[in-house]
């Protein structure tokens, strides 16, 4: 597995937990607003971190860390992921997985084996707009299957959408809410133009607070927990 980043401690990425973050390279989407472009394109130039180094870190912080966030890129593209997670679990840590939901087969395996404790799945757009937003071909059935699998499992989870001007409007958020209605948690995330996969998106001005709150007001009735992040 190509591990290309390790954030040793985070208080904000795993809700309610102290965690570290492991970044795995490679992604099958090309979201132009991606905040981790080095993990999507050009990651072969980044130094690789060995699994041993990750496990050494976990061992040294056993007393302080509750869990590990496994992020990317898209971690489920790696066949070795279940084995990696088994090793983390055997050390007694909780695991949060960040995913774009394109690999329901892998998700099923992880859920069946109870290898994940929290799943954060990106919802990029209403289904009919997915390919336009992620700039690649998408098997929408797989996205739908991942959503249904997560919702019907007893794993803790969130769905989240980055609201990018020019890609998503409040009408799109309304369509997403109709699709996800009744889910446990839904987060609307503010777009950040500082680092983006497509350099032209660094000029895109994020939605104003009022516009994000308009999306929140559309969304909030549909979920047990609904919040806006980053405004
Ligand atoms: S935002 Fe996520 S899904 Fe999109 S390209 Fe970046 S890592 Fe891949």
Image: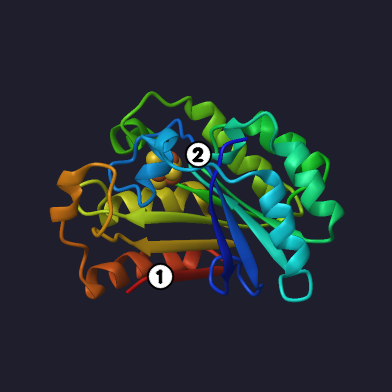
Residue displayed at 67% across by 59% down: 68
Residue 194 visible at all: yes
Name above or below for residue 93 compared with residue 63.
above
Which of the pair 34/52 is nearer the observer? 52
Dividing the image into four quarters, tell me where ligand 1 lies: top left
Residue for badge 2: 25
Residue displayed at 42% across by 49% down: 176
Name above or below for residue 106 compared with residue 209.
above
Which of the pair 173/197 is nearer the observer? 197
Tell whether 54 sits left or right of 174: right
Q: Work out which quarter of the rendered image holds the C terminus and state it.
A: bottom left
Dot placed on the residue nearer the N-terminal end, 2 or 1: 2
Residue 166 in the image: state x and y as whole percent: 18, 48
Residue for badge 1: 228
Local secondary structure at mark 2: loop
Which of the pair 99/80 is nearer the observer? 80
Residue 43 in the image: state x and y as whole percent: 42, 37
């Amino acid at each position: 597995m190509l591990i290309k980043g390790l954030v040793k401690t985070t208080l904000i990425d795993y809700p309610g937990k102290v965690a570290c973050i492991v970044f795995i390279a490679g992604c099958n989407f090309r979201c132009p607003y991606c905040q981790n472009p080095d993990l999507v394109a050009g990651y072969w130039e980044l130094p690789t971190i060995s699994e041993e180094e990750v496990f050494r870190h976990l061992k040294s912080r056993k007393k302080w860390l509750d869990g590990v966030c496994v992020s990317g890129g898209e971690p489920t593209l790696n066949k070795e992921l279940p084995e990696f997670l088994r090793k983390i679990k055997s050390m007694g840590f909780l695991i949060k997985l960040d995913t774009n939901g394109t690999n329901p087969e892998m998700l099923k395996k992880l859920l069946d084996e109870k290898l994940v404790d929290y799943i954060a799945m990106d919802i990029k757009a209403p289904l009919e707009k997915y390919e336009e937003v992620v700039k690649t071909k998408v098997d929408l059935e797989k996205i739908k299957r991942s959503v249904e699998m997560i919702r019907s499992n007893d794993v803790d989870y969130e769905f989240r959408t980055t609201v990018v001007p020019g890609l998503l409007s409040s009408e799109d958020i309304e369509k997403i809410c109709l699709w996800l209605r009744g889910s446990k948690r839904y987060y609307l995330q503010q777009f950040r133009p500082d680092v983006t996969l497509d350099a032209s998106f660094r000029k895109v001005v994020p939605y104003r607070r009022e516009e994000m709150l308009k999306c929140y007001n559309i969304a909030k009735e549909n979920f047990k927990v609904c919040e806006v992040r980053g405004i």
